[in-house]
Amino acid sequence: MEQITIREIAKLCGVGVSTVSRAINNHPDINEETKTKILETIRRYNYVPNNSARNLKRSESRMIAVLVKGISNPFFGTIIQTLEREIVHDRYIFLLQQVEDSEDEVEVAIQLEKEKRLKGIIFLGGMVTHSKDSLERLTVPYVISTVNMELPQDQESGAVVSIDDEEESCRLVSRLCEMGHRRIAILTAPESDMSIGRSRLNGYRRALKDHGIESSEELIIHMKRDEVSYTLDCGYEMARELLERMQGKTLPDCVYGVSDTLAIGACKALFDAGYRVPEDISVAGFDGLDIAEYYHPDIMTVCQPREQMAEETVRILLRMIRGKTVNRRVIFKAQIRDGASVRKIQQEDE
Amino acid sequence: MEQITIREIAKLCGVGVSTVSRAINNHPDINEETKTKILETIRRYNYVPNNSARNLKRSESRMIAVLVKGISNPFFGTIIQTLEREIVHDRYIFLLQQVEDSEDEVEVAIQLEKEKRLKGIIFLGGMVTHSKDSLERLTVPYVISTVNMELPQDQESGAVVSIDDEEESCRLVSRLCEMGHRRIAILTAPESDMSIGRSRLNGYRRALKDHGIESSEELIIHMKRDEVSYTLDCGYEMARELLERMQGKTLPDCVYGVSDTLAIGACKALFDAGYRVPEDISVAGFDGLDIAEYYHPDIMTVCQPREQMAEETVRILLRMIRGKTVNRRVIFKAQIRDGASVRKIQQEDE
């Protein structure tokens, strides 16, 4: 459908272009009757008063794809919202594509790149260690967001925006140790995972070691399903498994879920089994979701600066698209948020 | 970039097309060396082994836009996931666009339609009563999903997939009345809202009337902000306001938040003020989010069949796109899910 131009509208109304412009912009300096006539004509001919329609047409290929694994994960809500806002703000088209847990996101991206004229790609979630080879097949700039992946040095069109999952997890578990916890169980990704679940587990192991606590394999619960699934019911199931393992043994002091969703699922399993949180057992999470703060008791967690990370992701991608140099590795600091879900264990308790 | 064809790959490798096909499909009946050679060639020339790239190119305009108001609302998580899956499954391009609370979604759609060659539109959230005039300006089929809006009879390119918010809200509040609750407070949308907040409030009023309970304006809390915001902190704020209004008066028996997020926010405010749920005051929600089930106590709520509604939305839209007749108004039944957040009030309690 050919767009009618402002010039044609002016002609149809027997006025000048500036008068049409005044009518559109609600300028006071215009005769009411003329204004009504112009606005009616605009409506009748479906004229799009600003230039965005044509601008967008001209730039049909100004498209940035966001590939997200786990789209219903509440952790991504704010991030997707911010990415969309920033991308659209810069007059790019925002293309959201979910990647199934079983799919390889780089393969999906390579495919997408061939199908559309993408200007850039943002990966959200997933991203197990990808081979240099597969990443090299991407021909447009990309940013891996919220996953702290090591990119090969020569991957000049790629960047990473993340927190240091291992380090932050280590800080959280250290805090738990300092609060007197020694038997700390962890609910984490499947054994095969090489992404954030693995890093957070490594941080947990390091913290225990730093505090002279031997880590016990029976306190480490991996997701049973093959696929990574940071859901409430997965946390519930894993906590049930932990409780089964603990039959006839001393309960752990604390259960650490490597996501807030896992931690909340675990709380529910503990409540259902008749335990109190934190009186009988403490629970800690990771991510800093709003719901962790609103849960009862509120969950101690690690807050990722999600909005800033999303903004930085778009900023870096746009700079790369424009051929400018960027910091190809931006690691944000996270913050521990205390919560009533973790109690302090006094020396005399032991 | 011109795509290399399977014929050219075959030529380069000195084999027939069927052999290339066998290599791609991992067919056992092929010499290993030949297979390796073919796969290397495919890689080197970036050949896309299946037809999807070209199919998609040919159908560049097979695009369905999903306009969502409140993208970070957890209620939409599963719905967006299902819509994306169904739309992509039918080989359409899924275009997600968030609409700001202050924006008019129909205007955004009209604009988008002019900018892109959309095949159809799905509206999610928002949709206050829109004038027939503005809806008539849409030239492609559209489905209003999860909002029970009355479409003008002659809007033949539009359909509605929803629950009956007023009816379901009435059923929930009736259940509360039957459980012995009489002073029931409601947390709902701003006074100006004409969407689901209004319908659920109407259902509340009707249920009270049916049970011979006079509704009291002081028990009706509207969002203060001008914009509709079904968030945890909004629920928290509104419950705080309710508690302030109740100073020196009898506490309500129950607080009904017209979304689970509002109900959970309210619980937190009650806990923070030293009350117990449900011993001192009961809390009920609406929507049937997973978190309502995992909250402690679990929240009594109305479960919307979200996945089925999303599937039906896409099914109807695709039928309209293909010019087939559809049921232009599909109203799903919801289900009340009991929860420990609401106690039964015995007659002798009163």
Image: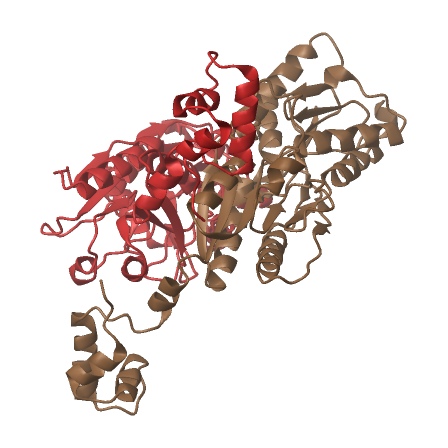
Chain colours: A brown, B red
Relative depth, front residue between A210 and A99: A99
Q: Residue at x 59, y 49 (%)?
A: A142
Relative image position of residue A89 (x, y in whole percent): 48, 63
- Toward the top, the furthest residue is A248
Report if residue B178 is visible in the image.
no
Relative image position of residue A208 (x, y in whole percent): 83, 28
The reply, left or right, for residue B240 in relation to residue B127 is right
The reply, left or right, for residue B3 in relation to residue B236 is left
User: In which quadrant will I find the N terminus of chain A?
Assistant: bottom left
Relative image position of residue B233 (x, y in whole percent): 52, 50
Relative depth, front residue between A337 and A187: A187
Q: Residue at x 28, y 38 (%)?
A: B314
Q: Is residue B303 above or below residue B56?
A: above
Relative depth, front residue between A48 and B195: A48
Relative image position of residue B75 (x, y in whole percent): 41, 40
Q: Residue at x 62, y 45 (%)?
A: A144
Report if residue A287 is visible in the image.
yes
